[in-house]
Amino acid sequence: MNLADVKKLADLARIDMSEKEMEEVAKDFDPILAYVSQVQEVSDGQDLSVKNSEDHFLHNVIREDEVTNERGEYTEKVLANAPDTQDGFLKVKQIL
Amino acid sequence: MKIDLKNLTIEKAHESLTKGDFTVTELVTAYLDVIKEKNKEINAYLEVYGDVLIQAKHAEEIFQNGTATLMTGIPIALKDNMLFEGHIASASSKILENYKATYDSGIVKQLKNEGVVFLGRTNMDEFAMGSSTETSAYGNTKNPLDITRVPGGSSGGPVAAVAMDGALVALGSDTGGSIRQPAAFCGLVGLKPTYGAVSRFGIISMGSSLDQVGPFGKTVRDAEILFNAINAFDKNDSTSIKMEDRIKPSPLKKKIGVPRSFLSTDGTDRDILKNFEESCKKLEEAGYEIVDVSLPLIKYSLAVYYIICPAEVSSNLARYDGIKYGLSSEEQKLYDVYTKSRGKGFGKEVRRRVLLGTFILSHGYFDAYYNKAVKVKEEIKKELTKAFEEVDAIITPTSPFMPFKFGEKLNNPISMYLSDLFTVPANIAGIPAISIPSGKNEEGLPFGLHIMAPFLREDILFTIGKDFERLI
């Protein structure tokens, strides 16, 4: 992993970092990636869609997309945490 | 009257509250006094809630109505990643410094119904990323048993709150060992329940496929009572297990497995192994047969964890953008608002893990790391499930090393990550596991015994735990 790789990751992750820190990260990643690469030693060959039978109780719960609250019921509460708002909307900076 | 907090348990407190030896307000005040005296040094609590005495009054009304349960009026500490409406929950991060919860988490809602008193929110590694509570944006928490050492992590605040007698019990969250390792470091009992047993709704997410909330207590019975109070289905958590799907307790085989070859890998402290052998002997005295179990794959659990967890972290933390809530950097362009807010708001370890997850999920590496790790996770789960056909439980030490000094492991990520060596397989397999104090070394630092049980069989952990506790 080199500095250019880390710069690309920081950009993808939208995190502003100093060049010095990115160099440190590049250095830290090599031993971490070497460690986690151990998983390659395990032979598998199973189909990912096959789940353990014990997992029968773990499944995605899909519900009807229905409105469960009054319009605007939580607006004030939720917007109270927002840095910038206007007329009940979140306000963002210029995009382009 | 002076309340003996050191030896207080939930049942003793309940009895005294029922008989009128002391009131909820008196009990809560006793804890607030300890917090006032000790928190400055220990830094377990980031905030004592302003409405604690109002909560206490409410609990007293429940006692007067005659509808009190064991948990009514019990003063507990929350971890800083649990939402309690109207109160700050910051995950010990700068990015959520002023975030006020807009709703109650599932666990808070359930406990509120029973009239539990939430004393305050306690310190943690930032977004639960760490094993020493040193990555918190709000300073270190000290181990109340030895203030030169870490309390463990990531639930260092909740564990220290109980260990300093600043709360009767506490709630933590555990993604790779974050309840059990601090419990071992501070001489307490800590339980990570089955994945899906306790609601994750309103818990600030770290690794969603691994996170689980659980209790800290001085005794196995206290952990059991608090677990029972939060062990419920929640429709707001899509991974919550319905009550009718939960496995009913069945008689024990009285057989416990030890994965010998796993214990001898990766440099576990010799004192810890010695203490572990003594624990095995005690369990034999208690009537359990100790047998070897071969688990060749569990040594890969930590590698699997450090692929799956950062991947989920990078996705979960994408929501902190400086727009909806939390820290927002004043910039001209939207892109800069994102990058500067996240750059300033996240600490070093969080930034490192988000980048690691971004790498793992990136094109060209996704199959080699993430997909492979998910497959190995399933294999580990199968291996453990098969082992439980022969034994009730599997035991190891909780931590491969004793509570360490501040700064000792902070700059060596792999060394810090090894803290979770013995605890992480339970998260990977989704099974319940508990850490129970198993004695102290010459310096007075505590050892922990780690017990894992099959899916939804927390009852086995409590049974073995109580048998073991009697012999310590």
Image: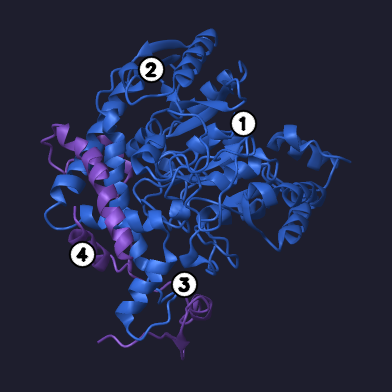
Chain colours: A purple, B blue
Image point (22%, 55%), residue name: B359
Q: CA distance from mark 4 to mark 1?
A: 51 Å
- Chain letter for mark 4, please: A
Q: CA distance from mark 4 to mark 3?
A: 24 Å
Find disc 1 in the rendering and name its residue: B221
Asked whether B385 or B319 is in front, the reply is B319
Q: Quadrant of residue B304?
A: top left
Answer few, some or many: residues within 10 Å of disc 3's Cα (few below 14, many 20 plus, some between 14 and 19): many
Q: CA distance from mark 2 to mark 4?
A: 47 Å
Please name which of the two marks, 1 or 2, marks the residue nearer to the observer: 2
Residues at discs 2 and 3 in contact (Cβ within 8 Å): no
Question: Is B315 placed above or below B22 here?
Answer: below
- Residue B89 position, x and y percent, is 54, 62
Q: Secondary structure at mark 1?
A: helix
Which numbered tag is attached to residue A8? 4
Q: Earlier in the sequence, mark 1 or mark 2?
A: 1
Relative placement, left or right, of B169 versus B90 is right
Please name which of the two marks, 4 or 1, marks the residue nearer to the observer: 4
Q: Earlier in the sequence, mark 1 or mark 3?
A: 1
Q: Amino acid at mark 3?
A: Leu
Q: Are marks 4 and 3 on the same chain?
A: no
Q: Are marks 1 and 3 on the same chain?
A: yes
- Residue B429 position, x and y percent, is 33, 36
Find disc 3 in the rendering and name its residue: B327
Relative placement, left or right, of B226 versus B201 is right
- Chain letter for mark 3, please: B
